[in-house]
Amino acid sequence: MRPIIDLHMHTTASDGTQTPSELLEAILKKNIALFSITDHDSISNIDEMILLANEANVKFIPGVEVSAMYKGQEFHLLTYGIRTDDAELMKILSTNQIIRDDHNRKVIEYVSTFVPEVSTADYDAYERNPKSGGWKSENYLSDKNVTQSLNDFFDIVSKMDEQLVFPRLEEVLPKLVKLGYPVILAHPPAYNRRQFLSFSTLDELRHWGISGIECYSPYFRFDSDTTYYRNYCKRNNMMITSGSDHHGDFIPARVLGIPRILADQISYDRLLKLAR
């Protein structure tokens, strides 16, 4: 079996259900030869995974998925080759973590206005199990039986008058590039209501420093979607990457190693240089 590549997955450091050791065990079973964990605005499991991957002789790229706003919409920036002792990177991630925590609490404040069993005091004292996946407010409302699914949770959020707003992409992206990291646009079909991002939009992102595009992802429905972004990358000498966006049992439909992408389908040599 030829080894496969998966450069987008999550652990208990954000909204995945697997610890680094559990995830690596699954990676070895899947014959994944190069991988990256890209938790949302968190790098707390990176150092452990570096050690584990070295012991298992598997190529690992330290990464993180950074959230930013572009024209009023949340975009995700896969940032590779990161250093866990980078104080400037930590400032960017800490800012986003504070924004997430504040929004989580606002969700609970909103729900407490119509569900008597929910209160901010109870929420503040609540300790989530990281292996549940998801995030604190989602876990709390699920444990309180207020929500039965992710759709229930997002229905509540959509009714709130409080949008989750991160710093602007045009500010965050150049900062990441200045720190020396290649930054990849994650799962482009997730934006713009699954319509193609225009060439003018992609040109703008490239102007601000995007190094490549995640051209293989469960978000893509048709081969023509992948071809659109692959061709753009090739024309502009940009990196082509792939990722499952695996979250363990939290989102079972996103299976580790799927799509099954081999080294010759992506910018393997350029990516391999980022491995620790």
Image (cartoon, rainbow, N blue to C red):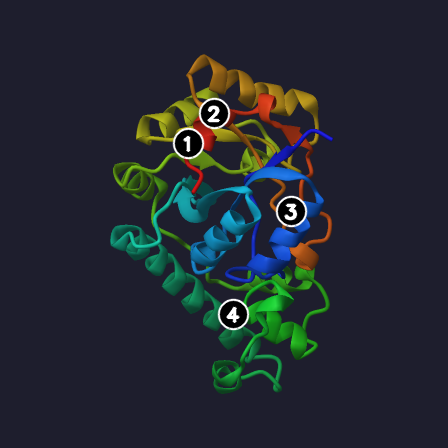
Front position in the image: 6 or 59: 59
Residue wearing tag 2 = 269
Residue type at mark 2? Answer: Asp
239 in relation to 103, above or below? above
Looking at the rendered image, the disc whose residue lies closer to the viewer, 3 or 4, is 3
- Examine the rendered structure and indicate whether residue 20 appears above or below residue 186: below
Figure disc tally: 4
21 vs 207, left or right, is right
| Extreme residue in the top direction | 235
Question: If the image is split into quadrants, where does the C terminus sit?
Answer: top left
> Mark 3 belongs to which amino acid?
Ile
Residue at the spot of label 1: 273
Q: To which residue does mark 4 refer?
A: 107
Name the residue type under label 1. Answer: Lys
Q: CA distance from mark 1 to mark 2?
A: 7 Å
- Mark 2, Cα crowd under 10 Å, few <14 / some 14-19 / many 20+, is few
The residue positioned 46% from the left and 20% from the top of the image is 199
Which of the two discs, 1 and 3, labels the residue nearer the N terminus? Answer: 3
Q: Which amino acid, mark 4?
A: Val
**Position of 261 compared to 91: left or right?**
right
Q: Nearer the viewer, mark 4 or mark 2?
A: 2
* Pick the front one: 80 or 53: 53
Q: Which mark is residue 27?
A: 3
- Give residue 265's quadrant in the image: top right
Q: Earlier in the sequence, mark 4 or mark 2?
A: 4
The span from disc 1 to disc 3 (Cα, nearest Å) is 20 Å
Can residue 19 be seen in the rendering of this structure? yes
**Where is residue 220 shown, x and y percent of the image?**
65, 32
Q: Disc 1 vs disc 2: Cβ atoms closer than 8 Å? A: yes
Q: Mark 3 packing: few (<14 Cα in 10 Å), some, or many (20+)?
A: many
